[in-house]
Image (cartoon, helix red, strand yellow):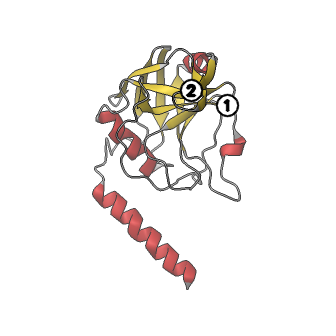
Amino acid sequence: MRNLFLALIIAFFSCHIFAESIEIDPDNLFPKVKFETSKGVIIVELDRIKAPLTVNNFLTYVVEGEFNNTIFHRVIGDFIAQGGGYDKDFNMRKVKADIVNESGNGLKNEEGTIAMAKESQPHTANRQFFFNLADNTNLDPGRGWGYTVFGEIVDGLEVMHAIGSVETDYDDNMGWDDVPKEPIILTKVTLLPVE
């Protein structure tokens, strides 16, 4: 009975989320997004089949220009490069509602994939994302929730690795480790037209 009750609650909230969000490029199952960074250009193909809520959420930020002029604020070589949440002065950018965790979709946190950052609770992803700089199986779901992978780099893998190799340090103002000494700017993110 408890499982049925939980299933009904999840179904209700899933329908509620779909009802309130406007679908971006809904007929394109694998939309491509262009990341223009201070290190070069990265093209990412998103997977709407495996991560529909995550892709639509991400594209909403893209078409609203919310990722433009943000930074990669956390870079750990051979692990991840995280960004999308702060401008170059470390001001937090506008955050929409958290989304449902889709980490059980079969996509893995492998080198060259893009995934959603979250807090310790499973359904706390909203706008920050990260690129996997290596195969990070520890970020995949297992006995607990993982980090939702929702696409992969199809061009510009060398740019991602250039970002991953920058020098980082502790930032006194923010109280964070792994902050690039020289800001890595994400100048513009664009949804590409269907090919």
**Can you give x and y, in whole percent of width and height, for residue 62 in the image?**
35, 34
User: Label 1: few (<14), some or many (≥20) within 10 Å?
Assistant: some
Q: Earlier in the sequence, mark 2 or mark 1?
A: 1
Residue at x 50%, y 13% (from the top left corner)? 39
User: In percent of the image, x 51 and y 28: which residue is there?
Assistant: 173
Res 61 quadrant in image: top left
Residue holding disc 2: 172
Q: Amino acid at mark 1?
A: Phe
Q: Nearer the viewer, residue 107 or 179?
A: 179
Residue 5: x and y, percent?
Answer: 49, 80
Relative height, residue 10 to residue 46 (above, below): below
Can you identify the residue that label 1 sits on? 79
Q: Give the x, y percent position of residue 139.
A: 66, 44
How packed mark 2 is, by other alpha carbons closer than 10 Å (few <14, some 14-19, many 20 or more), is few
Q: Report the front residue among 165 and 179.
A: 179
Instruction: Please indicate whether residue 134 sits to the left or right of residue 93 in the image.
Output: right
